Image (cartoon, helix red, strand yellow):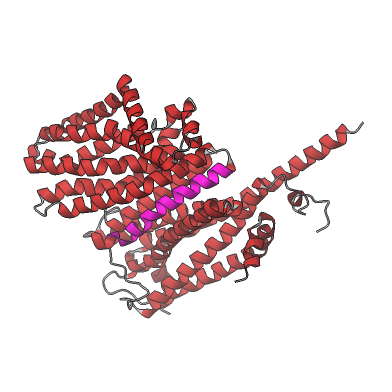
């Protein structure tokens, strides 16, 4: 357990010293949210209708940007192999890496989304559901994305390949995440969508770290 | 026979483009796939034969 | 099932021989089944009351859709065998299956669009089934791209196996998504437990075409695996002794 915490702390500290990665993710999200109204026009009803989808896709693509480098730095300086050889279960270490990724790249999106939602004239309730759906959904993206990052470790064209591998798997999260906000707007209530998102989180939380550890072993052996 | 004439068969009640577009593309692509698989085998065998010839040449040349 | 038989054919050398014997009769069988299916579908089956002659696309669309899903499950199965038993052949079978699966997925989308245009008025509708088929197509492309990008065959096999298994978790969601969404798509009218809601002859046509696609897949995968075996095992003695590689050897 202490290995988990120390790895998590280490990753967070490293990211704090080189904040460019986190800033890239945040900046991308803001830019997407800002550009869309410029592209589709200022009509409030249209923006309110598009908002859940636009913001969710923005968050999804922003998470994808940082996934590439999840294991890259550690792989390059040999730390990853040390982790593989150490006595600590690789699955536990992977959990730490995924958690760090989420804190650095997912959590900022969750916190920013309500602010950006205001740009789209979303109601208070909708902002709440949006933030909640992202809160549940972005860890799922980190979990699934980590598997892709491990599989494409060290490959040429890694970024595009990672996106290709991982985007089909992201679709259920996107559908239920954006759908939760849309369901609220349609008066149907978002509980069903959020419940399914929770189920996806539980499924990916249990399955992904192990799968990611296997992928790392495949990539490094 | 279900169709009054061959013309009626090809016409497919007005849906000719869609029905024959589907059937045609399917057979065409499966044909291309078969051809491609055959080509792959032919190239693999040619490459293996060339490698073996080069190997035999090398070992023959190695003898004093 | 004698255990000996399985492990015997798990060796690339013996599988090569087995596949060499089997693929041609399978290919001919596939052709015969396809002709029979086309006959039943286009000559025997009646006109549909609502969709006229246009419905006959289902004799191609449904079989290729089924196969695109079945092949992915087969890839995932061989992926499990590859990871658990570390069998080289399992990895090769997975990679041999992928192009055919991708092809069927593409055909499913193509025939689906050609069916949708006259029936629903649009070339593409974002209903659950079609969208899921599109996602499946991307899963295939991802598998092929990843296995092509990795140089080491062992790593490629195992990485592909993991991708196939993780993707396969998606396949049930794809299949049952019709129940979770309001869609335009016809509910599955053929199931093993319910009586189908279409004429007997239509059902027979579809099943014959589906069998034809399945047997075709077997034939082409066996054929393709032979080439893969030759490439992977090129340094082995038995490859050098094959009559097709070494013309001097008496067969």
Q: Nearer the viewer, residue C91 or B39?
A: C91
Question: Residue A27 occupies which quadrant of the picture?
Answer: top left
Q: Is residue A17 visible?
A: yes
Q: Nearer the viewer, residue B58 or C40?
A: B58
Q: Is the N terminus of chain C in the top left, top right, bottom left or bottom right quadrant?
A: bottom right
Q: Looking at the picture, how far across and down is residue A173, in whole percent?
A: 27, 47
Q: Is residue A43 depicted above or below C182 in this figure?
A: above
Q: Is residue A156 visible?
A: no
Q: Is residue A82 depicted above or below A185 in this figure?
A: above
At 26% across and 40% down in the image, what residue appears? Answer: A138
Q: Looking at the picture, how far across and down is residue A190, in whole percent?
A: 14, 51
Q: Which residues are magenta?
A: C154-177
At 43% across and 73% down in the image, what residue appears? Answer: C205
Name of the residue lying farthest toward the top = A17
At 86% across and 33% down in the image, what residue appears? Answer: B61
Count of all numbered marks drawn on residues in the image: 0
Horizontally, residue A76 falls left or right of residue A197, namely: right
Q: Nearer the viewer, residue C141 or A126?
A: A126
């Amino acid at each position: 357990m202490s290995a988990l915490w120390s790895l998590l702390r280490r990753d967070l500290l490293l990211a704090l010293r080189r904040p460019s990665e986190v800033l890239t993710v945040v900046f991308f999200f803001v830019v997407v949210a800002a550009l869309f109204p410029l592209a589709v026009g200022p009509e409030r009803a249209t923006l309110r209708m598009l908002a859940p989808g636009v913001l969710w896709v923005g968050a999804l693509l922003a998470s994808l940007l940082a996934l590439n480098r999840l294991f890259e730095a550690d792989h390059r300086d040999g730390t990853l192999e040390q982790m593989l050889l150490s006595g600590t279960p690789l699955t536990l270490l992977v959990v730490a890496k995924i958690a760090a990724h989420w804190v650095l790249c997912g959590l900022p999106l969750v916190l920013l989304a309500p602010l950006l939602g205001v740009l789209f004239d979303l109601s208070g309730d909708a902002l709440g559901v949006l933030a909640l759906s992202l809160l549940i959904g972005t860890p799922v993206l980190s979990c699934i994305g980590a598997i892709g990052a491990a599989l494409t470790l060290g490959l040429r064209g890694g970024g595009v390949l990672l996106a290709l591998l991982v985007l089909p798997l992201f679709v259920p999260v996107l559908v239920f995440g954006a759908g939760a906000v849309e369901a609220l707007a349609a008066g149907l209530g978002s509980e069903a969508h959020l419940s399914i998102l929770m189920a996806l989180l539980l499924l990916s939380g249990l399955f992904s770290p192990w799968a990611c550890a296997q992928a790392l072993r495949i990539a490094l052996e | 026979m279900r169709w009054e004439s061959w013309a009626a068969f090809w016409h497919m009640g007005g849906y000719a483009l869609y029905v024959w577009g589907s059937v045609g593309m399917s057979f065409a692509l499966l044909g291309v796939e078969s051809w491609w698989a055959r080509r792959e085998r032919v190239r693999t065998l040619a490459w293996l034969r060339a490698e073996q010839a080069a190997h035999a040449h090398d070992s023959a040349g190695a003898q004093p | 099932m004698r255990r000996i038989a399985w492990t015997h054919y798990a060796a690339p050398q013996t599988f090569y021989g087995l596949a060499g014997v089997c693929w041609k009769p399978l290919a001919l069988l596939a052709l015969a089944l396809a002709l029979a299916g086309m006959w039943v579908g286009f000559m025997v089956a009646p006109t549909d009351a609502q969709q006229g002659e246009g419905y006959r696309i289902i004799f191609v669309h449904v079989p290729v859709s089924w196969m695109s899903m079945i092949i992915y499950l087969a890839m995932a199965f061989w992926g499990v065998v590859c990871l658990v038993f570390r069998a080289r052949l399992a990895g090769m079978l997975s990679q041999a299956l992928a192009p055919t699966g991708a092809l069927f997925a593409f055909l499913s989308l193509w025939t689906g669009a050609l069916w949708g245009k006259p029936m629903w008025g649009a070339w593409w509708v974002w209903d659950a089934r079609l969208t899921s088929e599109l996602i499946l197509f991307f899963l295939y492309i991802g598998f092929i791209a990843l296995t092509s990008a990795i140089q080491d065959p062992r790593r490629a096999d195992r990485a592909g196996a993991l991708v196939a298994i993780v993707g396969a978790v998606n396949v049930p969601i794809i299949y049952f998504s019709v129940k979770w969404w309001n869609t335009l798509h016809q509910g599955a009218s053929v199931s093993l437990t319910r009586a189908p809601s279409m004429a007997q002859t239509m059902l027979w046509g579809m099943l014959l075409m589906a069998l034809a696609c399945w047997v075709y897949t077997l034939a082409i995968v066996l054929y393709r695996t032979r080439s893969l075996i030759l490439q992977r095992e090129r340094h082995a003695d038995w490859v050098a002794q094959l009559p097709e590689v070494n013309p001097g050897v008496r067969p």
